Amino acid sequence: MLSNIRVVLINTFHPGNIGAAARAMKNMGLNNLYLVEPREFPSPEADSRAAGAKDLLDNAVIVSSLEEAISDCQLVIGTSARTKRTFDLPLLNARKGAERIVAESEQGNVALVFGRETMGLHNDELQQCNVHIYIPANPEYPVLNVSQAIQLLCYEVYVATEEKTYTPIEEEYPRQKEMTLFYSHLEKVLRTTEFIIPQHEGKVLDKLRRFFNRSRPERTELNMLRGILTSIEETVERLKK
Amino acid sequence: MLSNIRVVLINTFHPGNIGAAARAMKNMGLNNLYLVEPREFPSPEADSRAAGAKDLLDNAVIVSSLEEAISDCQLVIGTSARTKRTFDLPLLNARKGAERIVAESEQGNVALVFGRETMGLHNDELQQCNVHIYIPANPEYPVLNVSQAIQLLCYEVYVATEEKTYTPIEEEYPRQKEMTLFYSHLEKVLRTTEFIIPQHEGKVLDKLRRFFNRSRPERTELNMLRGILTSIEETVERLKK
């Protein structure tokens, strides 16, 4: 469902690219634009490049962090010019990725996240994604302008919707904010069991977050995991008495 | 063969779009840019938007007519936001069109023609094309920025090359300039036979050109047609004696 799909732009430098992105989205039937700390917005340059898609700019949601932009999403897609796996996330090309986006958008919200003009997504942002998408390109000059990358992905999404090339998803996935609650719960329990020790925190939580983002527990599985955490807490409480 | 494919831009108004087109092409492994009477070129704005594809601008071929840009091409593709048939040319979507482009580029030169920012291709330009391509898009707002349209088609061409989704073409097609010679020959013969009469020229030649562009005679068929024209001339000569 195109209305469940949003495009998230992080720290866009040139306002013209925001305008071009809005037009590219509307050309492909997408309407939900989220801007994480744009350098300059609103802007006449953005309006001009948006042409007939000014309404998307007027309705754009401005937020201060990626987390805020994706908290009600069940699938978060990071786009990247890198064609090698990073953080062991599943890596799909634009076409396969679009089929996935469209399939999951039948169930809930999906975010397509694009990074800065100069350097794409930071590592901590990539870690908040469930899947990476790359655009097949000339290996000698693979980095597209951000608005062109948006155009391509929105086009693939539109074509996948039109041609129904996707396979419906059976599983139900939790929202990102439920995952965030799970991570807090997990951290609390791991401190209780002293798996995490204040003086030697290491990167345990980062590694666990990476693992769970990648493995994407379904909703019933997440409930089970939460239940296990609770049972550990209750056992500890009981033994303390 | 990507090196046999060229992008032809007609009367581009914003030099930034020429730069963006060059980058989009190079991102997808295409290098041959033809500019038909650009309003402003070279231009700093074009250089800036081209980023790492400045070499394509330096090597761009500037010509004064579409005819000149396509004379050595065997297949000429007109791009258009119209999704209905115009002039009865075969109409393909971007994906199917790209497969065709890649298949024929194994044999000879192929031109992908893009019109003005404001109004696309004129009718007389569309008539010089063998096939129309359209980009599937939101019917309520289907007109893409020209550099975005170029990005999408070059991407589809790149993917078709990579995935070899095309079927090799068996037929050999004539170049546009051979077609031009044929049309001159045809006109000469039709004047001889008084099918075309100076005072009542009508649109006979336009209609015939449209017909032959659409039906795309193969090289052997064109030779045969030329032979028929010659036989008519010889017969007339013989009878005159």
Image (cartoon, coloured by chain):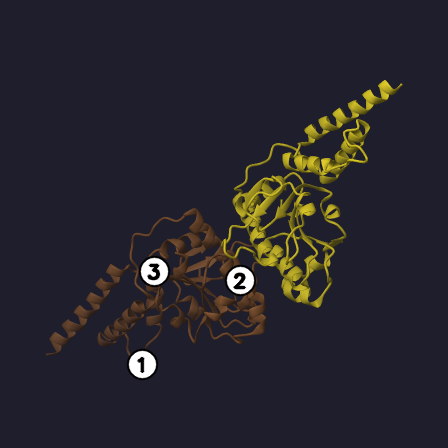
Chain colours: A yellow, B brown
Q: For numbered disc 2, what is the local secondary structure? A: helix
Quick check: B149 left or right of A178? left
Q: Observer-nearest residue: A160 or A100? A: A100
Q: Which mark is residue B199?
A: 1
Circle 3 residue: B108
The chain carrying label 3 is B
Using a 10 Å C-alpha cutoff, classify the residue at mark 2 as few (fewer than 14 neighbours), some (14 to 19) or many (20 or more): many
Q: In the figure, residue A27 lies in which quadrant?
A: bottom right
Viewer-proximal residue among B216 and A188: A188
The numbered dot on residue B23 is 2
Mark 1 or mark 2: which comes first in sequence?
Answer: 2
Observer-side mark, 3 or 2, equals 2
Which amino acid, by three-letter code, is at mark 2?
Answer: Arg
Q: Quadrant of the N terminus of chain B?
A: bottom left
Residues packed near mark 1 inside 10 Å, few (<14), some (14 to 19) or many (20 plus): few
Q: Do callouts 1 and 3 point to residues on the same chain?
A: yes
| Disc 1, SS | loop
In percent of the image, x 61 and y 42: which residue is there? Answer: A131
> In the image shown, does A205 or A221 lie closer to the viewer?
A205
Q: Secondary structure at mark 3?
A: loop
Q: Quadrant of residue A10?
A: bottom right
Amino acid type, mark 1: Gln
